[in-house]
Amino acid sequence: MDTDIHNFLPLQPRDYLLLFALSAGRRHGYGLVKDVKEDTAGAVTIDPANLYRSIKRLTKDGLVADADAPDGATAGHERRRYYRITPLGKRVVKAEAARLADLATLARARRLI
């Protein structure tokens, strides 16, 4: 399937952060919340309702898929639902990262950062 990744851009900031977190490997919902908070130095927190609404949409769009629990998951983890980024999702998050990098370059040129 040859999907034009630019149809997904620009990503909503929350979607970018979730795909960014999933690019490091499969995660369960709470793991995603922790990763986003850590990746943004606490500036962004995602509540469960918004998290699962976003995951549902990203899954529908083919950017995220269900995943098996990792090998060696501790007790209780078998009940958690895990997610992974799809190949399409990886292409989209890479394109969004490049788009944001270009904007940062422009901001530097204008001495905004």
Image (cartoon, helix red, strand yellow):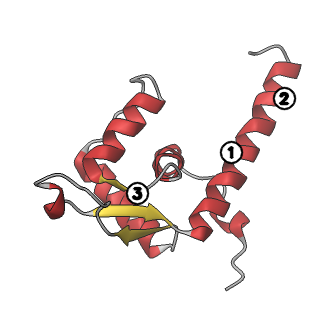
**Label 2: how many residues lie within 10 Å, few (<14), some (14-19) or many (20+)?**
few
Work out whether mark 1 precedes mark 3 in sequence or the reverse, and give the earlier one: 3
Quadrant of the frame with the C terminus: top right
Residue at the image point whose x is 50% and y is 73% from the top: 61
Work out whether mark 2 precedes mark 1 in sequence or the reverse, and give the earlier one: 1
**Label 3: how many residues lie within 10 Å, few (<14), some (14-19) or many (20+)?**
many
Residue at the image point whose x is 26% and y is 46% from the top: 30
Q: Could you tell me residue 71's position as x and y percent?
A: 30, 61
Residue 76 found in image quarter: bottom left
How far is the residue under mark 1 from the one under mark 3? 19 Å
Quadrant of the frame with the N terminus: bottom right
Q: Which residue is mark 2?
A: 106
Q: Residue furthest front?
A: 72
Q: Amino acid at mark 3?
A: Arg
Residue 75 found in image quarter: bottom left
Is 57 or 19 nearer to us in this picture? 19
Label 1: which secondary element: helix
Q: Could you tell me residue 104's position as x and y percent?
A: 76, 29
**Label 1: how many residues lie within 10 Å, few (<14), some (14-19) or many (20+)?**
some
Residue 28 found in image quarter: bottom left
Left or right: 82, with 10 as reference point = left
Q: Which residue is mark 1?
A: 97
Label 3: which secondary element: loop
Q: Amino acid at mark 1?
A: Ala
Left or right: 66, with 4 as reference point = left
- Contact between labelled residues 1 and 2, with CB atoms less than 8 Å apart: no
Which disc is residue 26 wearing?
3
How far is the residue under mark 3 from the one under mark 2? 33 Å
